[in-house]
Image: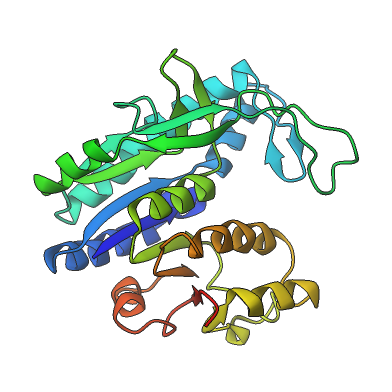
Amino acid sequence: MTIVVKIGGEVVGSGEAAILAADLRILIDAGARVAIVHGGGPQATALQKQLGLETRQVAGRRVTDAATLDVMKMVLAGKLNVDLCATLAAAGVRAVGLHGASGLVVQASRRPPKVYAGAGPDPVDMGLVGDVTGFNLELLQTLWAARYVPVIACLGADATGGVFNINADLVGNQLAAALKAERLFLVTSTPGVLRDVNDPSSRLAQITCAEARQAIADGVITGGMIAKLDEAMAVVDQGVGAIHILGKLAAGDLVRAVREPGSVGTTLIADA
């Protein structure tokens, strides 16, 4: 079984990372091939503030100038990647830290100006933000063959030396599609898709793409979960077996989500 795990920055810097690492060790020992993609938005924003740099966002997306890209490199490929690999190592996982320029494992091109919902009618140039154009799957296969686990910071690169900031959900989703992974885990700060964002007990255990679109149209699903689901639904039809959205992890949650889909978080599946 191939599993891609996308971890948000809020999880990387919390005690949940150790819980996640222990669960991943169980799955790896059972034969799973695991690739991890991580973000670091909260930590990048905090460092920008410390450095006196303005954090600019358009429709919830970070505008990335040269100074901001340097911050993303320091936070993503630096501190967070090192800390996450160390946490995984403590659980017995043989983690190898990577970023987009590592063997061009995440290939990307600069995103051209485009119109964003909620940002007005004119195209917006997001700066040094990239779109994924491919992956070095041979490198991942080589690491897996030697029983290593790739831990990929969400930066992309091109063959000319360009480096780009990329949303971690986007990297995780597209990597899962490229690998035709049986499972994609989006580990967030919320316990799944909720009917009521203020009530954790309103969790939807399983949802099809059609049901998700209807819930968005009805206003049941709101805020940042809309973008997360939109991007996830785009790859369900590309060979990804199931997408699990989960957070607030307890020991064993990741293993239960694999063995009993819907028992933890929300499982997104293709329409029948």
Q: Is residue 248 visible?
A: no
Residue lying farthest left?
A: 146
- Front-lying residue, 210 or 204: 210
Taking the image as shown, residue 109 lies to the left or right of residue 195, namely: left
Q: Is residue 106 left or right of residue 62?
A: left
Q: How many marks?
A: 0
Looking at the image, which residue is at 26% across and 43% down?
150
Evaluate whether residue 10 shows in this view: yes
Check the image and tell me how it is coloured.
Answer: rainbow
Q: Is residue 16 above or below residue 272?
A: above
The residue drawn where x is 34% and y is 60% is 181
Q: Which is nearer the eye, 28 or 33?
A: 33
As drawn, 73 above or below 138 = above
Q: Is residue 79 left or right of residue 57?
A: left
Q: Quadrant of residue 116?
A: top right
Q: x%, y% of residue 118?
A: 84, 48
Quarter of the rendering occupied by the N terminus:
bottom left
Q: Is residue 50 above or below residue 121?
A: above
Image quadrant assignment for residue 217: bottom right
Q: Residue furthest top?
A: 160
